Amino acid sequence: GSAQAEETKMTTRMIEGVSEIEDTFDAFILDQYGVMHNGAEALPGALECFDSLLKAGKKLVVLSNTSRRAKDATSKLPSLGFDTSHPAVVGLVCSGEETWKHIKEHRHGQKVLWLTWERETAGDGTGYLDGLDLVKAGPEDADFVLCHGSDAIVSAGEPIMTGYQLSGDVS
């Protein structure tokens, strides 16, 4: 009962910074937005922490929940001062990249109804679906729906801009 619960009770030690635990671990997973930067600049202490971990020989993985591919999601990091080309940066993981890989492996040749961001509707050969063997289809013919953003609905015809970001109206 309660004696067993007491034995397994854990305590949390508060630390002032990563430097206090740097020697304890071989690797660190760092979320990029809100931990490393705010979208415009590196957060206070983030560059120093990142560089300290690199100098200490720690393996680093940069994590993001963005719907973009990894190369796009992390392209801003060098301009903010983060050396993502360093050999100790062993991974750049984001949900958009993992989704793209899953679709490539498991959805070859299927029909997709795609909800996406306006930037993806340009069709300039640099978009999210590039490299995937998919056919854009309407809801009646689609094998699956990829909800990648909320600005546009892309099916067999021209993209339909939703205006959702401005109005919040999904009708």
Image (cartoon, rainbow, N blue to C red):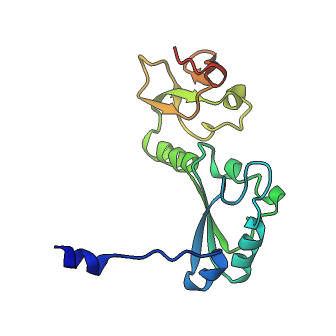
Q: Kindly identify the residue that appears in the image at 56 percent across and 39 percent down.
A: 132
Q: Kindly identify the residue that appears in the image at 82 percent across and 63 percent down.
A: 81
Total tally of numbered discs in the picture: 0
Q: Kindly identify the residue that appears in the image at 79 percent across and 49 percent down.
A: 40
Image position, residue 20 (x, y; %): 63, 81
Q: Is residue 92 above or below residue 22?
A: above
Q: Is residue 164 above or below residue 17?
A: above
Q: Nearer the viewer, residue 60 or 156?
A: 60
Left or right of 4 in this view: 147:
right
Q: Kindly identify the residue that appears in the image at 67 percent across and 82 percent down.
A: 57
Among all residues in the image, which is located at the extreme bottom? 23
Image position, residue 34 (x, y; %): 66, 54
Left or right of 148 in this view: 143:
left
Image position, residue 52 (x, y; %): 73, 78
**Rendering quarter of residue 5:** bottom left
Q: Nearer the viewer, residue 37 or 154?
A: 37
Among all residues in the image, which is located at the extreme left? 1
Q: Quadrant of the N terminus?
A: bottom left
Q: Is residue 59 above or below residue 34?
A: below
Image position, residue 85 (x, y; %): 75, 66
Q: Nearer the viewer, residue 169 or 115?
A: 169
